[in-house]
Image (spheres, helix red, strand yellow):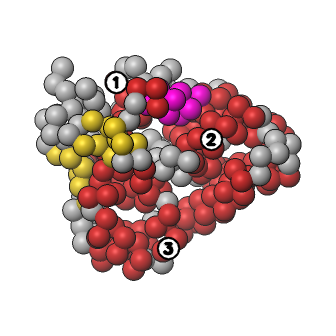
Amino acid sequence: MKTNLGVCVKVLDNAQTIAETINAFPSVYHDGYFNCRTIAKQYFLNRTTGDYLATDLASAVRCTLEQWGAGKREAPGLQPLREFSNALCQPEIRASLAALTGTPLSALTVVRQRRYLNAEPAKYDDLLSLESNLFFALHTLAERLFIENTNVTYPMKAVLLMTGFMPAFDGKVRAGLQRGGFSGMNKTQYLLPASAVHSDGKKISGLPFLLGQCWAMCASQIREGISKSSFPELIQEPGRVFDVLLFMQADKRNTITVTCEPTSRVWYDFP
């Protein structure tokens, strides 16, 4: 297998197009996201496990997931609100989500195809810890928040709503990734992998580093585009920004904004 040598993720559009793309994204989806993140930030600051913020966050996340399609068509059903609240009161779940919140895309990058964390080469134990928190959160939320969930989509949406860590691999985002040159994303189903050992898991754990590289390298037009949009508060939410841009570029009537070059490389396989 070819390794990830020379892969680079870029934002191609100018600031005005980025602003227009953000504004064209359904406003109800923006509203639900910001509501959840506002409550989540307070939830992570308050270390008391059985507090009212867990219930407030559970209610907001459950409502937004329902607005985003959970329980409809072939999407998994939602557990009762009490189960959402009980899950978010668990110290282990709170800790894993807090760890992801404390590691935003802006703290991640790739230099000469080596992953960096907070501007330093990432140590093996740090990478293992990040991956462990991510996959623990995905699997635990899949089990505790949803009914008969097998795919990555809705656990990733739940993680996104609470932490802003990275885009959620729903059908639109996967199509946007594929259209932008991220090979291997044109799946009709994307089952939740056990870990980052195999290719589907590597795509989940590797993408945040490449997007972090893009966030830093293309900072000028991204930041200007966000500031010109109707949602300037997205400047603090890089994971959500890419979620929106990738979702929108799934539509072939829209220009390709986020691209991975060269497309011949296995973008997710870091040495």
For the residue marked with disc 1, what is the amino acid? Ser
Q: Are marks 1 and 3 in contact (CB under 8 Å)?
A: no
The span picked out in magenta is 127-136
Tell me the amino acid under the disc marked 3.
Answer: Phe
The quadrant in which residue 95 appears is top right
- Tell me if mark 1 has few (under 14), some (14-19) or many (20+) residues whose alpha carbon lies within 10 angstroms of its own: some
Q: Measured from the top left, where is residue 142 in percent x and y?
A: 63, 31
**Residue drawn 57% across and 48% down?**
101
CA distance separating discs 2 and 3:
24 Å
From mark 1 to mark 2, how far is it between C-alphas? Answer: 23 Å
Residue bearing the label numbered 3: 231
Q: Earlier in the sequence, mark 1 or mark 3?
A: 1
Is residue 225 inside the magenta stretch? Answer: no
Disc on the earlier residue, 2 or 3: 2
Label 3: which secondary element: loop
**Label at residue 261:** none
Which of discs 2 and 3 lies nearer the camera? The answer is 2
Q: Which residue is mark 1?
A: 199
The image position of residue 72, as x and y in percent, is 61, 43
* Mark 1 element type: helix
Q: Position of residue 108 (x, y in %)?
A: 39, 46
